[in-house]
Image: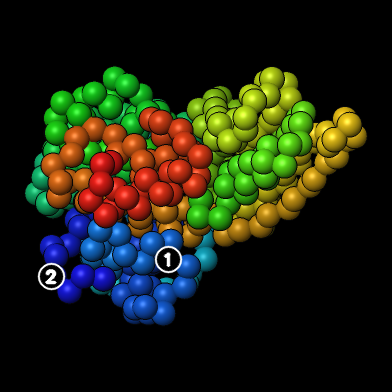
Amino acid sequence: MTTEQKAPIRVAIAGVGNCASSLVQGVSYCKRMGDKAIGVSFPELGGYTPTDIEFVAGFDVDARKVNKPLGEAIMAEPNCTAIFEEDVSDHKAVVRRGPDLDGVSNFMRNQDPRRAFQVSAEPALSKDDVVSVLKESGAEVLVIFLPVGSIEAAEFYAQCALEAGVSIVNGIPVFIVSNPAWAKKFEDAGIPVLGDDFKAQFGATIMHRAITQLADMRGVQIDRTYQLNVGGNTDFLNMMDGDRLAMKRESKTEAVQESMKARLQNNDIRVGPSDYVPWLNDRKVAYIRLEGRLFGGVPTSVEMRLEVEDSPNAAAEALAAIRCARIARDRGLAGPVKAASAFIFKHPPEQMGDEEAYRRMIAFAEKADG
């Protein structure tokens, strides 16, 4: 880590759910543990560490979070992720009442209120209000952690960030950074952005890609594969509404397809959320299967079961993406930060193999092209 004193990376969060909880906890955890912090993907990037992050604003729609300090809001129901850092009292930025738009589905409104959203009666902020909050807070980066399928809401916050001169780190499967029209808007405005849809630190997508890449490397003919995921957090409950899943399935499927030498036919690959099991809470269980043929056409198959706490798995990569956004801003870059996006996200503007993306991301952090 550099000894030079750097200004904090001022971060706003749209969607104060489980992933936001793990992210905020993670910054406090790194401050307390220092070099002994476990599982930090990149302890230092471009001279920045996770402890350089400061949260300055939050937006949510839930009555249990709105108007609360961020450190209190992240502990409120329906959040159910692991508490690995109990003292988060230093995160005092107030969570503001964002607009519902399509962030709250009719399906979610009719579920157990302890498991689902309780929509606040407070009046929602307008676009101009959100832009003002971003500007007045001095936010440099807006992390989008909205529910899957929140296309209108994600685009609303992207537009707010654009008008406020704030970079976005888009953690959800709504295609903004990988959408050429949106990418050009941010490029023209001189704002660097990263996305879309986090790959978890050690999750189902990265494991699935590893299996397919190994099979290709060893000359195995891949015939078909699936990845079935179950979990018990609000994300999985929200995804029981199949109409909200199109981009999620595309994002996860393309991340796996890209890792193989030859694309599979649509009927030979199935990737994505499969069911909601409330008692799992924030645990996610992934079942991965690959079928193929060895030398001589002899059949083979492999099955894997992976269990993780879902939200810390994403937060680890958010810590890296936020710092990459700041590095890009320091250098006056604009538009998608392609190398970092390829390593950190499932649906980046430019797909790359994991090893290539890793090398290019490190090179970017060390002042090569982004």
Pick the quarter of the image with the C terminus.
Answer: top left
Residue that appears at 35% across and 57% down: 319
Residue that appears at 74% across and 32% down: 222
Spot occupied by residue 325 in the image (x, y as percentages of width and height): 25, 47
Which disc is residue 266 wearing?
A: none
Spot occupied by residue 77 in the image (x, y as percentages of width and height): 47, 57
Residue that appears at 14% across and 30% down: 189
Q: In this view, does 87 lie to the left or right of 270?
A: left
Pick the residue in front: 245 or 192: 192
Spot occupied by residue 119 in the image (x, y as percentages of width and height): 39, 43
| Amino acid of disc 1 | Val
Q: Which of marks 1 and 2 is nearer the N terminus?
A: 2
Which residue in the structure is indicated by mark 2? 5
Residue that appears at 36% across and 67% down: 43
Which disc is residue 40 wearing?
A: 1
Local SS, label 2: loop
- The answer to whether the residue labelled 1 contacts the one labelled 2, judged by CB atoms less than 8 Å apart, is no
Binning the other alpha carbons within 10 Å of mark 2 as few (below 14), some (14 to 19) or many (20 upward) gives few
In which quadrant of the rendered view does residue 256 lie? top right
Spot occupied by residue 220 in the image (x, y as percentages of width and height): 76, 36
Vertically, is 151 above or below 53? above
Pick the residue in front: 121 or 90: 90
In which quadrant of the rendered view does residue 252 lie? top right
| Amino acid of disc 2 | Gln
Residue 370 shows in this picture: yes
Q: Is residue 164 left or right of residue 212?
A: left
Q: Distance between the residues labelled 1 and 2?
A: 21 Å
Residue 14 shows in this picture: no
Vertically, is 272 above or below 3? above
Local SS, label 1: loop
Pick the quarter of the image with the N terminus.
Answer: bottom left
